[in-house]
């Protein structure tokens, strides 16, 4: 792949040797794909960021701000103390989930994409069964959203299927 991910085409027979419960016409194997402990990963990213002078401000609300040609100014308020402080930066990453469009508009952004809300559910395989040892993804169907319902084996060995897609 052009992004540096190594993919190997597999025949149905090769897939059956790796994952006997997977039936397919053909497959792509990504030998470097896996799962991570997301909490530990976030802690490691925070440690790296703090090493470069970043500060994590928990329980802090955005009151407003403005985007300038040379950077961004945001005004924040502590939920606990109502203290207000201003932060200036060359760039701000808006990772506010469902609130991202509202946050972008509060910073004076003019071209804010429309939000489309959907949710997905995961379903756990019960009874201690573990038919797969790897992540298994279907080829996404044309004109649908997401990656399709796939099988994930978590760090505890539990198999989950999902997510489905429900537009809200």
Image (spheres, helix red, strand yellow):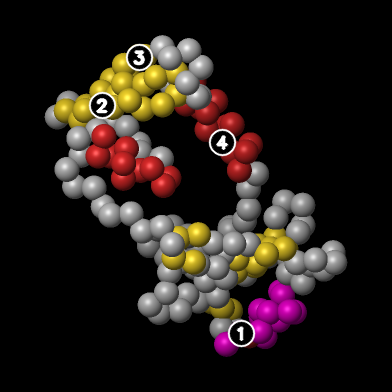
The residue to which callout 2 is attached is 65
Answer with left or right where residue 77 lies relative to residue 156. Answer: left
**What is the quadrant of residue 4 in the picture?**
bottom left
Question: Magenta span has 16?
Answer: yes
Above-or-below relation of 95 to 25: above
Mark nearest the camera among 3 and 4 is: 3
Q: Which residue is mark 1?
A: 24
> Where is residue 30 drawn, in percent x and y?
56, 65
In the picture, the disc for residue 42 is 4
Badge 4: residue crowd in 10 Å (few <14, some 14–19, many ≥20): few
* Residue in the image at 61% along x and 43% along y: 38
Magenta highlight range: 13-25
What residue sits 59% from the left and 31% below the top?
43
Quadrant in the picture for the N terminus: bottom left
> Circle 3 is placed at which residue position?
85
The residue positioned 43% from the left and 45% from the top of the image is: 97
Cα distance in 3D space between marks 2 and 1: 52 Å
Total tally of numbered discs in the picture? 4
Q: Of tags 2 and 1, which is closer to the observer? A: 2
SS for dot 1: loop
Q: Earlier in the sequence, mark 2 or mark 3?
A: 2
The location of residue 100, given as percent across then percent down, is: 35, 43
Which-is-in-front pick, marks 2 and 4? Answer: 2
Q: Between marks 3 and 4, how big is the CA–CA gap?
A: 25 Å
Label 1 crowd (10 A; few <14 / some 14-19 / many >=20)? few
């Amino acid at each position: 792949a052009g992004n540096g991910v190594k993919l190997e085409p597999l025949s149905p027979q090769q897939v059956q040797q790796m994952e006997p419960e997977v039936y397919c016409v053909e497959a792509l194997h990504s030998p470097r794909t896996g799962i991570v402990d997301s909490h530990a990963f976030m802690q490691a990213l925070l440690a790296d960021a703090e090493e470069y002078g970043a500060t994590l401000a928990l329980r802090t609300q955005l009151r407003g701000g403005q985007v300038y040609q040379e950077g961004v100014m945001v005004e924040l308020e502590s939920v606990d103390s109502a203290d207000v402080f201003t932060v200036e930066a060359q760039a701000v990453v808006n990772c506010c989930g469902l609130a991202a469009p509202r946050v972008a508009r509060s910073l004076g952004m003019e071209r804010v994409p429309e939000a489309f809300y959907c949710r997905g559910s995961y379903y756990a395989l019960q009874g201690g069964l573990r038919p797969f040892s790897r992540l298994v993804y279907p080829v996404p169907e044309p004109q649908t959203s997401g990656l399709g319902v796939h099988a994930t084996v978590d760090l505890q060995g539990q198999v989950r299927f999902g997510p489905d897609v429900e537009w809200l």
